[in-house]
Image (tube, rainbow, N blue to C red):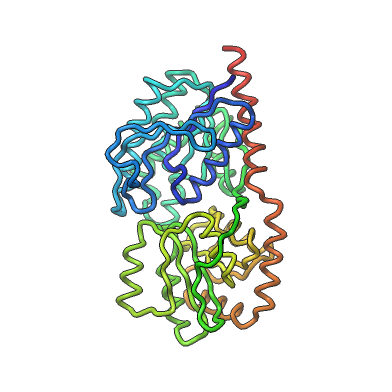
Amino acid sequence: MARALVVTQFYAPEPCAAAHRIEALARALRSTGMDVTVVAPMPSFPAGRVHEEYRGKLFVREIRDGISVRRLLHVATARRYGRYLAWLSFAFVATLYALFTARADVVVVSSPPITLALPALALRWLRGSRLIVDVRDVFPDLPIQMGEWSSDGWFARVVGAVATRLYAAAELVVAVTPTALERIRTRSGTTPVLFAPNGRDNVEAHRGTIKRRNGEFVATFTGNMGIANGLDLLLDAAKLLRDEDLRVALVGAGADYDRIKVRIASEGIENVDVYGVLPRAEAVGALAESDASIVVLRDGINESIPTKIFDAFAVGCPVVLSASGEARRVVADAAGGVCSAPGDAESLADALRRLAGDRALARALGLSGLRYARDYDREQIMNVLATEIASRAEAEWLTA
């Protein structure tokens, strides 16, 4: 039996898109007959604090859905730039674990963070494992687009060199969007690049969370409240809608969560409700009972397709999008929502007004998105990817 080692910074029970994607891939790998082990840090997302049941432990071994999971101690912090320390600390302990304990025919590493190149390359070069790299966001391209890094700075150059080395050492690189696929190909050399998009999960929606007052229109943001999301833009739009029969709901948490709550309170933005982190079924249920889903990305991010778009489509909820690039293409192709100008609060407010004033249009867009999402079942997408990975791992195992 071929052995697969999945190394990831995020894994269930953490409530984020990365964890959902990698958990689905691990299950799909197991369904091919592979012996699957996941190596991940102690859960700490989104609060930046290790979840209570894992605190004070150096190492945890557990079984989730029949998959063996190894939890390793790392530095967890809620500070905005503390995530770099969290990433580096896990990369270090994961490398030690991999070199002294792990045995695998194939290693699947999920990026970002790019720091996981350290255990990935160690296993490739010192253990001879075949390497598969699943790239959710392309580094250093994404932080450059966000204005976090300078394109000609030393940090971006170092990260770019690491990414190039990682892709070149891989047996296969996986891209989430067509644009990302082309960017990866410029660095990957002769390494094949496979397209495996995000998609909808088959999650039962538990309703009853959203508070609706007197039939008002409710638009809900779900997911990570991080620096890539334009939550300040969303609050600016909400302020423009204060006198209208429209309410915004925020579901989730992240690096910007506390700051956003302070801003809502200090500026008296009374048409915004904050629900915090909800169980997956309740978060999907919040979308199912909302009139629209708000998806915002910082201006300049062109390659990302947030999973929350597919979550909304899967329950027939139309999307109000403030973004450009791939996300805008998906919403347009699906005819599943309305798009506003990126970085423009007035444009976002107008898009919300349009749907609030035409409930029939909102329902029609939701149904169109629902039809579109049927072709993006995450389980099926991951099964295809897992079959490709298993065939490569099996070939290596049989010749070992």
Where does residue 294 sit, x and y in percent of width and height? 53, 67
* Residue 396, picture quadrant: top right
For the C terminus, give its image quadrant.
top right
Closer to the camera in the image, 157 or 364 = 364
Q: Quadrant of the N terminus?
A: top right
Q: Residue at x 32, y 36 (%)?
A: 73
Residue at 64% across, 58% down: 314
Front residue of 242/133: it is 242
Instruction: Tell me which residue sits at (42%, 40%) in the image.
Output: 9
Q: Residue at x 31, y 38 (%)?
A: 74
Task: Count the labels in the image.
Answer: 0
Q: Is residue 12 left or right of residue 33?
A: left
Compared with residue 346, is residue 297 higher up or lower down, i.e. above or below?
above
Residue 86 appears at what percent x and percent y? Answer: 32, 43
x and y percent of residue 77 in the render? 29, 48
Residue 312 or residue 133, whichever sits in front? 312
Query: Quick check: 2 above or below 224?
Result: above
